[in-house]
Image (cartoon, grey):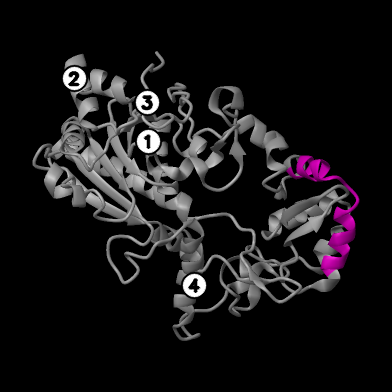
Amino acid sequence: MPHTRPPLASLRVIESSLLGPGAIGTHLADLGAEVIKVESPSGDYIREMTWPIIEGVSLLHLHVHRGKQSIALDLRTPEGVEVYRDLARGADVVIEAMRPGSLGRRGLGYEDLRTLNPKLVFCNISGYGATGPYRDLPSHGIAFDTWGGVVKPEYDAEGYCFIPEHASIGMHAGPMFGAMGILAAVIRARDSGEGCALEIGQSDSTAYMDWYRIESWLAYERPESEVTGNKADDYVRRAPGTAGMKEGVRYQIYESADGHVLFMASEQAFWKNFCECVGRMDLFERWPGSKYADHARGNRELQAVLRDIFKQKTSAEWIRLGGEKNFPVAPVNTPQSIAWDPQFQARFPLYPHPQHGADMLPFPVKFSDGALPVPGKAPTVGEHTRQVMRDVLGYDAERIAALEAAGAFGRQSP
């Protein structure tokens, strides 16, 4: 019988976040956790950050805070601090998605809260983590990618250096690894009765996501008698990662009749299947290649032939033939075009903008029982303050009114 409860329905998370690191709670909310975002009365300025702005609210906020509740607390007041402490008493997790020690300065750090709730998991996610010389540097998401070596500076026609277009890594990978660590810590806490504190730097996550190139360069620091290239390249070292793909021929991007495709026939069996498909077994006989990982590196004569062959069919025709004849070929999309790709449409039923404020991709893990909830729209500042006070903390109307009068929710609470 199908499950009706989301996987993390029993998890309560209190989140104090600013800007993109709040995505750590998004992953948990997407899986069904109750995530209560505690904001200052003025709110997280993520709602005004970057572009696009949709009906006055940033896409960044609409995505990062979907499925969460928002309460407004003024932690400069003792009443606001006490409410936060009450929330921590009944929570599984407290997330501090800002500079390390931000909550501690209000008497709400891990050591303060664990006395109230020994099972509590406290997670800090910040730019550079809680240690190291960069710990206190102010930063934004691109900083973690430049630090991690994944962005190569470029220059315009007038000689000015600029940030090239690239896929952000640290600001996405950091929250993902953080959510994974939180779940591991919660499982242990439920078994042992002991919570813990963990911290993650978004910069660390950038480096970890690029481990292959970093570790390749480290390997190349060793003697060539110990670390070589692969057999198909006569053991000559290539540049690490995708930089080593530039001279590839059987593994390369080619222009099709209406766009581009990625051809990946580096295994001999796939290369043979392709040559049979296009009626050019002469190419296989002349350049059969090695059994594995042979890109025909630097073979311009073969590359010119393949360039002409791929221009003869559309991308969709090449994708169809690759599936039918068993050789690897892939679409080459852009962030703009991918939404119209049939595979994307089959895998990503978008959350529509009339309900969510923006058309958004759902959580990319699928459960066979369909248990993942559809998240609610990202909240306005303090939208759920009274609801949480009443339903989560059990405060009566008199206490809520007293807190409001004391300014615990800010002087102009919604």
Task: Report helix, strand or loop for mark 3.
Answer: loop
Query: The residue under label 4 is which amino acid type?
Result: Ser
Q: Which residue is mark 4?
A: 216
Picture coordinates of residue 292, whole percent (x, y): 63, 63
Q: 193 above or below 302?
A: above
Task: Report helix, strand or loop for mark 4.
Answer: helix
Q: Main secondary structure of the magenta part?
A: helix
Q: Looking at the rendering, which quadrant does residue 338 occupy?
A: top right
Picture coordinates of residue 157, whole percent (x, y): 76, 73
Q: Which residue is mark 2?
A: 395
Which of the two marks, 2 or 3, is nearer to us in this view?
3
Query: The residue under label 3 is which amino acid type?
Result: Pro
Query: The residue under label 2 is which amino acid type?
Result: Tyr
> In this orientation, which residue lies closer to the viewer: 376 or 103?
103
Q: Using the numbered discs, state the Cα–Cα distance from disc 3 to disc 4 in whole angstroms.
A: 54 Å
For residue 28, the mark is 1
Q: Using the numbered discs, state the Cα–Cα distance from disc 2 to disc 3 in whole angstroms.
A: 18 Å
Task: Report helix, strand or loop for mark 2.
Answer: loop
For this orientation, the residue located farthest to the left is: 115
In primary-sequence order, the first of circles 2 and 4 is 4
